[in-house]
Amino acid sequence: MDILTELERRLIDEALERIPEEQRRVPPGVSGLDRDYVWDPTTQTLITRNEAFRGGLRSMPRRPARSLADRQKDREIAQDIRDGLSISEITMLRHTARERIQRVAREDGLEIARPRPVTPPGKRKTVSGNDEAITRKIVALVDGQRGLTEIARLAGCHKDAVRLRRDRLGLDIPAAKRRSAA
């Protein structure tokens, strides 16, 4: 607690004596800072015209201030967004809700990365058209008797990889034998 010196106390008393008695007190229900408060029902905020804020409208929403831990977590989320992580990745990493991540991005003016497409394990093609090891396996299995599906199974690749090499290299792979309904 600050202690006033005699000089400071005397200066305060002299300043108060210059102000008339009726202007020294603030009437009940009126703010000592500003008398121009207006309630805005659409935004649920108090709006004031205060010269301390250069005469502009200042909105004062009623909400509790965020704690230091919350502000730190918001900064970490913002950094994750800048690093290019998607919402689902940040949710798993920071154990937080999507709404919080979206709020942080909106407040900081950041763009959230779109999620990376993930193919299920059963749907993945095992090889590309440029894999030399798979090409050697396929060429070794071509004997004119084995079909496309069997060569793909034995080579451990997708049928499209065998089809691609058959067309590119002109391999002799017989067409699949269709069973006729007899």
Image (spheres, grey):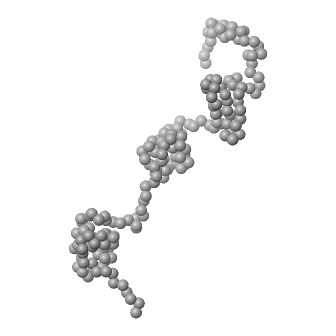
Residue 73 visible in the displayed image: no
Q: Which residue occupies 45% across, 49% down?
A: 113
Q: Quadrant of the N terminus?
A: top right
**Residue 61 percent across, percent down from the top left:** 64, 36
Give the total of numbered labels: 0
- Left or right of 122? Residue 65 is right
Q: Which residue occupies 23% across, 79% down?
A: 143
Between residue 41 and residue 99, name the one nearer to us: 41
Kindly indicate the quadrant of the structure image that contains residue 123.
bottom left
Between residue 152 and residue 144, name the one nearer to us: 144
**Residue 177 percent across, percent down from the top left:** 33, 84
Q: Which residue occupies 71% across, 32% down?
A: 38
**Residue 74 percent across, percent down from the top left:** 51, 41
Residue 47 visible in the displayed image: yes
Q: Image height check: is 85 above or below 165? A: above
Kindly indicate the quadrant of the structure image that contains residue 141.
bottom left
Residue situated furthest bottom in the rendering: 182
Between residue 170 and residue 65, name the one nearer to us: 170
Q: Which residue occupies 59% across, 35% down?
A: 65
Q: Quadrant of the C terminus?
A: bottom left
